[in-house]
Amino acid sequence: MKVLTSREFNQDVSQAKRAARLEPVFVTDRGRPTHVLMSVETYRRLSGQTETIVDLLAMPGVASIDPPRSTETWSRWEAEDGG
């Protein structure tokens, strides 16, 4: 279990996030634990939640991904006529 003071947490959030991938990180304020930082995977496992398609589609960057496009032109009329 990793313990960081609130000052340490504020000075290096990236370090806390890296540590939380491995184990929960307790953040203290005046020596008393006040928050716990953990990975989403750990949280979901503990709470019994699973990812849904909505979660996956809401991920940052997904909307900016363009599906591959064919360079061929296609006409519905050609397909009906056999080509």
Image (cartoon, helix red, strand yellow):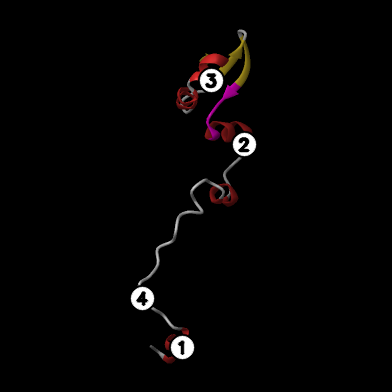
Question: For the residue marked with disc 4, what is the amino acid?
Answer: Glu
* Crowd band around label 2 with a 10 angstrom C-alpha radius: few (<14), some (14–19), many (20+): few
Say what secondary structure mark 4 lies in: loop
Residue 61, image x and y in percent?
A: 48, 48
Kindly identify which residue carries mark 1: 77
Spatial CA span between label 4 and label 2? 46 Å
Does residue 1 show up? no
What's the residue at 54%, 31% (across, down)?
42
Say what secondary structure mark 1 lies in: helix
| Stretch of the chain drawn in magenta | 36-40
Among numbered discs 1 and 4, the one appearing first in the sequence: 4
In magenta stretch: residue 80: no
Image quarter hosting the C terminus: bottom left
Q: Which numbered dot is residue 72?
A: 4
Q: Nearer the viewer, mark 2 or mark 3?
A: 3
Q: Nearer the viewer, residue 27 or 22?
A: 27
Question: For the residue marked with disc 2, what is the amino acid?
Answer: Gly
Among numbered discs 4 and 2, the one appearing first in the sequence: 2
Q: Which numbered dot is residue 10?
A: 3
Say what secondary structure mark 2 lies in: loop
What's the residue at 43%, 91% (across, down)?
81
Spatial CA span between label 2 and label 3? 30 Å
Q: Nearer the viewer, mark 1 or mark 2?
A: 1
Kindly identify which residue carries mark 2: 48
* Crowd band around label 4 with a 10 angstrom C-alpha radius: few (<14), some (14–19), many (20+): few
Spatial CA span between label 1 and label 2? 51 Å
Among numbered discs 3 and 1, the one appearing first in the sequence: 3
